[in-house]
Image (tube, rainbow, N blue to C red):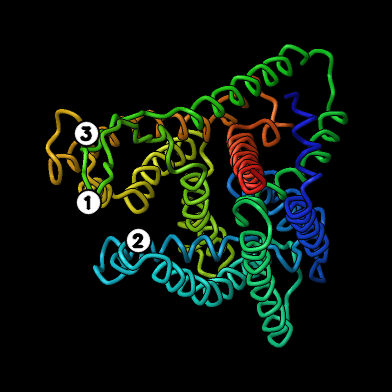
């Protein structure tokens, strides 16, 4: 069946069509909120600041330009993502959190998510104050009176909670992961502006460089699709069992393990972590203490170094790939479930030996996935250093393309699953 025929089938299904339209409606609400700014902004200083900072530039990209406009949702989903990271780190420290997240099923996951929602509020207030203080020290916004500062912090915090709520509405009533889709919407919203920048800076002399950009974009898209769809199939056999007059089992299947089971989450986590040192250094550089300001400025210059930025970004993405997979994928649980259902991997003893085998296989293929993610993340910086052209690097840069392609593939996979379910119900 041709792709446009499949698309027509999607919109013929009323329930599926309503879910997609609901997601599009949430996108419109998000874009409207992203264009409501707070008062007292120096636009010229604001544009100069974001053009000089790689990390804040990427953060602005994921917020769909909301940060560069200092809108009421300027923090995007940053506080919620940070809260989730902190709680997932706690699962590796406190057994109670690990049991809640891994062993108590859906009810435990709901409690865990509720804790993340609660932690979003203080983190949003803290990040909102840090952002406003940073922009004041850079001369981007004028001095804010205490009462107006409190009101602005409350507004920004409410904006972060509002976006978190929109993301959960998408996950509950729409289709796909709400957080990923809102980040996807922010990236897509920047596309017209990036095309405009290309048009304004067009120079026939740089045609080879633009061709290189497009070639790399095609390579990245192909690589993302291949890695996202690649799996390591582990053969699993089920022993024959007789219950009453019927025989069960006696067949073989596969246990698929993705080469990149963490998806785009490690990149989002890495960006959230990399934001804080630069933010604190920029904030302290505007203090009255000359020694402290000089020290902060030195740290800021060090972080702005392309090599430091690239190596740190790659390392964090690589490490978070292993970390997130360790939190979400438990070989011991899978081995126990296989044993309970009478399944086993040929040549491997059930139980502990199966868990160890799965652990070794997982961490071998994770090396490929983590290396791929890290390389894609730093690809824009490599290309910019090679060609000397910064325009369009975010639009076809590795991080943006990786997120867009991954989200589209995941959403299409869920749409196909729901279409198949509808067909099965009709049958």
Q: Residue at x 51, y 38 (%)?
A: 305
What is the distance, in whole Å, between disc 1 and disc 2 at their CAs?
30 Å
Q: Nearer the viewer, mark 3 or mark 2?
A: 3
Among the two numbered marks 3 and 2 on one chain, the one whose residue lies closer to the N terminus: 2
Q: Nearer the viewer, mark 1 or mark 2?
A: 1
Where disc 1 sits, the SS reads helix
Q: Residues within 10 Å of mark 3 (few under 14, many from 20)?
A: many
Pointer 1: what residue?
Answer: 340
- Percent across and percent down for residue 239 are 21, 38
Pointer 2: what residue?
Answer: 89
Where disc 2 sits, the SS reads helix
- Outermost residue toward the front in this view: 245
Q: Is residue 307 above or below residue 58?
A: above
Q: Quadrant of the N terminus?
A: top right
Say which mark, if any, is on residue 136: none
Among the two numbered marks 1 and 3 on one chain, the one whose residue lies closer to the N terminus: 1
79 left or right of 355? right
- Percent across and percent down for residue 265 are 49, 48
């Amino acid at each position: 069946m041709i792709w446009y025929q499949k698309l027509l089938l999607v919109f013929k299904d009323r329930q599926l069509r309503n879910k997609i339209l609901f997601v599009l409606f949430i996108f419109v609400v998000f874009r409207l909120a992203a264009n409501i700014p707070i008062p007292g902004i120096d636009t010229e200083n604001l544009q100069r600041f974001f053009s000089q900072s790689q990390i804040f530039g990427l953060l602005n990209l994921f917020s769909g330009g909301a940060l560069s406009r200092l809108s009421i949702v300027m923090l995007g989903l940053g506080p919620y993502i940070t809260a989730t990271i902190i709680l997932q780190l706690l699962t590796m420290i406190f057994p109670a959190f690990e049991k809640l997240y891994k062993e108590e099923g859906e009810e435990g996951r709901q409690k865990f998510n509720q804790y993340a929602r609660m932690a979003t509020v203080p983190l949003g207030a803290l990040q909102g104050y840090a952002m406003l203080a940073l922009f004041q020290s850079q001369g981007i916004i004028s001095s804010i009176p205490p009462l107006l500062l409190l009101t602005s912090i409350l507004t920004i915090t409410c904006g972060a909670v509002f976006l978190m709520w929109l993301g959960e509405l998408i996950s509950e009533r729409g289709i796909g992961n709400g957080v990923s889709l809102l980040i996807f919407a922010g990236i897509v919203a920047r596309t017209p502006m990036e095309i405009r920048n290309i048009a304004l800076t067009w120079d026939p002399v740089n045609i080879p460089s633009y061709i290189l950009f497009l070639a790399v974009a095609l390579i990245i898209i192909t690589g993302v699709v291949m890695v996202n769809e690649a799996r390591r199939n582990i053969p699993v056999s089920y022993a024959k069992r007789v219950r009453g007059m019927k025989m069960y089992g006696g067949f073989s299947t596969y246990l698929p393990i993705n080469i990149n089971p963490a998806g785009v989450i490690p990149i989002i986590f890495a960006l959230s972590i990399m934001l804080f040192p630069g933010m604190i250094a920029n904030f302290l550089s505007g203090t009255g203490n000359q020694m402290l300001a000089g020290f902060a400025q030195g740290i800021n210059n060090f972080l702005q170094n392309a090599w430091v930025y690239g190596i740190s970004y790659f390392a964090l993405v690589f490490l978070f790939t292993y970390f997130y997979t360790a939190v979400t994928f438990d070989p011991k649980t899978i081995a126990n479930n296989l044993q309970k259902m009478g399944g086993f991997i040929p040549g491997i003893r059930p139980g502990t030996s199966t868990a160890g085998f799965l652990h070794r296989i997982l961490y071998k293929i994770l090396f490929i996935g983590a290396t791929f993610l890290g390389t894609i993340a730093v690809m824009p910086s490599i290309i910019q250093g090679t060609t000397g052209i910064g325009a369009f690097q975010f639009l076809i840069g590795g991080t943006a393309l990786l997120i867009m392609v991954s989200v589209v593939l995941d959403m299409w996979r869920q749409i196909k699953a729901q279409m198949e379910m509808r067909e099965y119900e009709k049958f």
